[in-house]
């Protein structure tokens, strides 16, 4: 990777920005804190790499004070952000001499709300099956994947309550508290110990010729 002195990064950024294109691999909301963003990136292979600076702001190209991490770091969680807010993130790399590269491509994501809603899940029949995950509280905007698993002798039929669907798994977006029921139907019982006996057609009576 090429580096430029920080004092000259304004024009050096144009020369070395290609070195960081594609460096930023991912940016997503959530984690231990709802108003947070997790940044991941591809490690740089320069032998004199000292670390990275993570730039974050609420508008494209407009960042606050960067977070500095060491060369071994490839993922970082930005915390203390405003909920339900869009952020733009870009990275630079710096070497042992203190020279800093140009910015990587930007990534953008929106933090989650701090509001939590309750999701209650149940089944229609005792012993008919199970639903995962179980009931719990989720941040507003979180997508929960519900999966119904029928027990032996039962089949999943549909979801009822806050949603009406036959999809399984079912994607539920938490826009408020919800109660959802998985309906299972009992399969018809198979007869036990019954054997099918083939039947024969009766023989036709001989026809008299009249002689």
Image (spheres, rainbow, N blue to C red):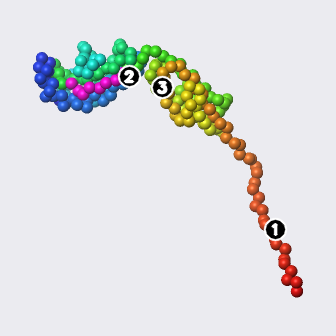
The secondary structure type at the circle numbered 1 is loop
Q: CA distance from mark 3 to mark 2?
A: 15 Å
N-terminal of the pair, mark 2 or mark 1, is 2
Q: Which residue is mark 3?
A: 173
From the viewer's side, name the closer residue of 158 and 49: 158
Which residue shows up at 43% across the image and 15% down it? 114
* Residue sticking out furthest to the right: 211
Which residue shows up at 18% across the image and 31% down it? 18
Which residue shows up at 65% across the image and 36% down it? 185
Q: Position of residue 197 (x, y in %)?
A: 77, 58
Q: Which residue is mark 2?
A: 29
Q: Which residues are magenta?
A: 103-110
Q: Which residue is mark 1?
A: 202
In the image, residue 195 sits, relative to residue 43, either above or below, namely below
Q: CA distance from mark 2 to mark 1?
A: 79 Å
- Mark 3 nearby-residue class (10 Å; few <14, some 14–19, many ≥20): some
Q: Position of residue 81 (x, y in %)?
A: 35, 14
In the image, residue 104 sits, relative to residue 64, either above or below, namely below
Among the 4 quarters of the image, the one containing residue 105: top left
From the viewer's side, name the closer residue of 60 and 41: 60
In the image, residue 49 sits, relative to residue 65, either above or below, namely below
Asked whether the beta carbons under mark 2 and mark 1 sit within 8 Å of each other, the answer is no
Q: Position of residue 39 (x, y in %)?
A: 32, 24
User: Total number of numbered labels?
Assistant: 3
- Quick check: 124 left or right of 3? right
- Quick check: 152 left or right of 97? right
Q: Can see residue 70? A: no
The secondary structure type at the circle numbered 3 is strand
């Amino acid at each position: 990777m090429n580096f430029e002195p920080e004092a000259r990064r304004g024009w050096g950024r144009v020369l070395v920005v290609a070195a960081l294109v594609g460096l930023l691999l991912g940016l997503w909301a959530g984690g231990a804190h709802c108003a947070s963003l997790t940044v991941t990136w591809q490690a740089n292979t320069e032998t004199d790499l000292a670390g990275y600076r993570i730039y974050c702001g609420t508008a494209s190209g407009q960042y606050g004070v960067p977070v500095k991490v060491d060369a071994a770091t490839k993922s970082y969680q930005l915390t203390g952000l405003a909920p339900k807010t869009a952020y733009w993130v870009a990275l630079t790399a710096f070497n042992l001499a203190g020279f800093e590269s140009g910015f990587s491509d930007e990534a953008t994501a929106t933090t989650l709300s701090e509001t939590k809603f309750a999701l209650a899940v149940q089944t229609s029949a005792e012993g008919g099956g199970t639903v995962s995950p179980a009931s719990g509280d989720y941040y507003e905007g979180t997508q929960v994947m519900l999966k119904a698993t029928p027990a032996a002798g039962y089949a999943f039929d549909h979801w009822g309550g806050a949603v009406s669907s036959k999809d399984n798994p079912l994607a539920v977006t938490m826009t408020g508290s919800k109660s959802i029921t998985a309906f299972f139907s009992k399969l018809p019982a198979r007869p036990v110990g019954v054997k099918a006996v083939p039947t024969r057609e009766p023989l036709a009576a001989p026809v008299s010729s009249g002689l």
